[in-house]
Image (cartoon, rainbow, N blue to C red):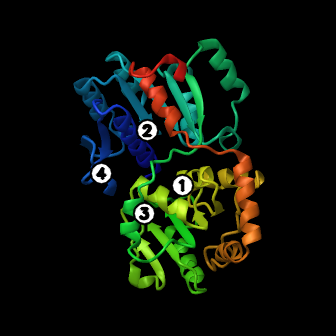
Amino acid sequence: MGEFARARSLADAMQARWPNIETHFLLHRDAPYAKEFHHPVTMIPASPTLCTDEVVRTIEQFRPDVVVFDNAGRTGALRAAVRVGARVVYVSSRGRQRFKAFRLRWMGLLDDHWISYPAPIAGGLGFFERLKLRLLGRPQVRFLDAVLAPADERAADELLAQFGSPDLLMVPGGGSQFDDASITPNDFARWSKVVAAQGFRVVFIAGPAFSGGAEDMPGVRLIRGVSGGALHAFLTRTKVVFVNGGDTLLQALALGKACVAVPIAGDQAARIARCAALGAVTAPRAVASTGIEPAEACLELLRDEVLRRALETRVREAGFEDALPALVERLGVHLGLASISSR
């Protein structure tokens, strides 16, 4: 889900900047977000990583100038992009994908390797990564901060529908269920009820994997189908954000928000710990069986404005930024639409 949201924001921003460019997505046909999508799509039976033949065929038919592989894809697909003369961008969101992108055979195919998350969180370039880059002279490596879609205030107003700006925005994520963590969106739902019971306005952004209903969450505004622009508006309006360790965490930090974070996937725990080490996030101990401490951490920030403002100050000092403008410019260079100085 995070990869899709990032790619969607990037495509929307590219078309807003250069309305005549053509975009095309390859999406899993069963993904909830693939339905009624506003960019041209080729539906494939599984993840692009598992459908190399379909990916290659689409690349050969569409013959794009740039192909962005967001945390997905195999060597055959990258080679197909190179064969049609496309610039190749790979986004790695996890350690395993980062390792793949730093293999010599991949480095020779990539023009850009974007590492999702800033260096203090993802971990800076290691000795062998730097050595390989010196030997090959490619690809260009960029650590990403948040990728924020432009705020859509009208969509946010319609979704809130007289509820008012939230005190706490809960974004558990969950385009799919992760098997490597004990915390799930259902735990977030239980914590949201604890906070709402204390009289605070809680908005819960449900991902595709969350099957609960509003009737199970008294006092909580449950919202589905949130666009990136509406989410940006929600993040701006709320006092506190309760989130997992994925992309929305970085978006909230780039907006200077006070965040409470717990992991719902195995790779997120270390990421949240690095944010906590920077003093930029509150990372309570999340126990799925009781689920009290994360809710208490949210309540503490909501009740204590001095504490919340201090956390917001540390977030701003950490220097997280919106990476989207720079990425648009970089793709514009690949397309011959932006000057080389914008690199």
Instruction: Name the image quarter holding residue 332.
Output: top left
Q: Are marks 3 and 1 in contact (CB under 8 Å)?
A: no
Identity of the residue drawn at 38% across and 34% down: 17
Which secondary structure, mark 4?
helix
Residue that mark 2 sits on: 72
Q: Is residue 189 left or right of residue 120?
A: left
Q: Which mark is residue 248?
A: 1
Q: Nearer the viewer, residue 253 or 30?
A: 253
Residue that mark 4 sits on: 34
Q: Is residue 217 left or right of residue 225?
A: right
Mark 2 vs mark 1: which is more N-terminal? 2
Q: Amino acid at mark 1?
A: Thr
Identity of the residue drawn at 59% across and 30% down: 142
Mark 2 vs mark 4: which is more N-terminal? 4
Which secondary structure, mark 2?
loop
* CA distance for labels 2 and 1: 20 Å
Q: Amino acid at mark 2?
A: Ala
* CA distance for labels 3 and 1: 12 Å
